Amino acid sequence: MANFALAPDWLAVPVQPNALNPAIWPAHAERTDAGEISIAGVPARALAAEFGTPLYVFDEEDVRSRAIQMRETFEAAFAAIGTTVSVYYAGKAFLSTAVVGWVRDAGLRVDICSGGELAVALAGGAPASELGFHGNNKSVAEIDRAVALGLGTIVIDSSIEIERVAAAAARLGRVQAVRLRVNSGVHAHTHEFLATAHEDQKFGITLADAPAVVAAIRAHDSLDFRGLHCHIGSQIFDAAGFAESAARLLTLQAELLAGGPVPELNLGGGFGIAYTEADSPAAIEDIARGMAAAVGEQCARLGIPVPHIAIEPGRSIVGNAGVTLYEVGTTKQVSVPDAGGADADNTRLYVSVDGGMSDNARPALYGADYTVRVANRASEAPVRLVRVAGKHCESGDIVVDADYLPSDVTPGDLLAVAATGAYCFSLSNNYNYLTRPPVVAVKAGAARLIVRGETEADLLARDLGAAGSTVQETAR
């Protein structure tokens, strides 16, 4: 076996380079007898031929089943300590009207962070009363709209928001339910830019300041204080961080109970998924049991009632259910002199595709790693260390930093990048004026468009200087 000197330590040479690890790929992804990747019975080449590339593909039944599993798992775990659970789907992971329907069918509520996400959630059929509204800088207009709609819960992120929400509710003759976001000080094991419970960051308030802020909330007749909220980060692989955060929050909750009811506790989300063979997140059942045990034990220790619990999973529902298809445009071998020993392979094959950081910004933002496979065929050729690059005019435009592909990968091949269901569409952009890709749902051998891809005409429609120009659309 070749010694690939440029490979990162965590990346193992695959024993079966055509295999699709079920922990990483959608539940209904498989190789056909002809060697092609098929998702929910729809072959990759058929998808590319009908919808073009790049293309986001979602295994609909996989999303639905993960949502149901999430709700049932947490309900069972917390029922064992005598309480109930509300599961909010974190819409920032991926939001469309179709997905809103899928998670609502599974019994989930929806978590939103902006007026735009509110509009999508409502258009997808979610009742305003089942929405939670996050954000560190909700506009006055967004707050007014949310209160007027009878939004389920608004998460207060700063003292300034107390007055804004209270004023809107009083003006409209409503009593608005609110939670208070606090920073528990628990630092999840994650990328620094993804960690959201540090004391020195933009979200929430400190535990020390919380009693005074809660008193300010309770001073308004137009506000109904429901409880605390905390989010400790993303890509969290076990229950330890949640357990410690819950212990700190419940200690604060015990103090707050002296001034009035605190019926709920929102422990956030951030449950991790496998993007590569090196990732080993705990089973969601283990995380749920660990969180429930921590809550039950701390409530017993403090002598307080176990509150109603809320959680906010997103990535763990849609992440592995999504795949992005690309077409290979060029390949280029690069050698790094003196890398490794005399017997080491010091080369890397750059494989450039027709998308990039406009459809997946996570590698550039977070150094995120992904798994890639040739999708249109299987190959018995020896593997090569590859770096899948995008087509943008940016050296950081990398889709997959390091993986192994057959050495015969060639222009015209289709590549499938796994676990792109979360935060890829959400972060998509028009860098270099690339159009954002369409989104397709596949189920039982059929594919349907759930989000139309952009055209060049769409891009120019917002450019007022181009009002008199003639634009030829590129159908997607």
Image (cartoon, grey):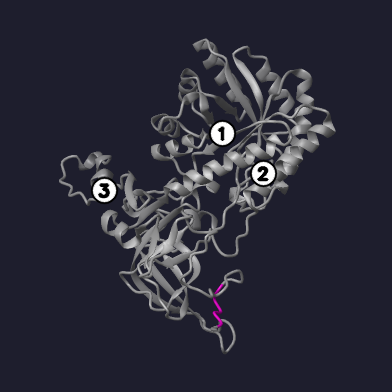
Which of these two is toward me, 166 or 159? 166
User: Is the magenta region chiefly helix, strand or loop?
Assistant: loop
Closer mark to the observer between disc 2 and disc 3: 2
Q: Which residues are magenta?
A: 3-7
Residue 475 on image: x %, y %? 23, 50
State if disc 1 and disc 2 touch (CB < 8 Å): no
Which of these two is toward me, 367 or 98? 98
Is any atom of residue 186 visible in this view? no
Residue 422 on image: x %, y %? 49, 49
Q: Which residue is mark 3?
A: 455
Provide the secondary structure element on which disc 2 rests: helix
Is any atom of residue 286 visible in this view? yes
The numbered mark at residue 136 is 1
Q: Judge from the rendering whether residue 84 lies leftward or rightward of residue 355; answer left or right.
A: right
Q: Dot 2: few (<14), some (14–19), or many (≥20) neighbours within 10 Å?
A: many
Quote the CA–CA distance across marks 2 and 1: 28 Å
Provide the secondary structure element on which disc 3 rests: loop
Which of these two is toward me, 386 or 464? 386
Which of these two is toward me, 304 or 217? 304
| Above-or-below relation of 208 to 349 | above
| Above-or-below relation of 414 to 421 | below
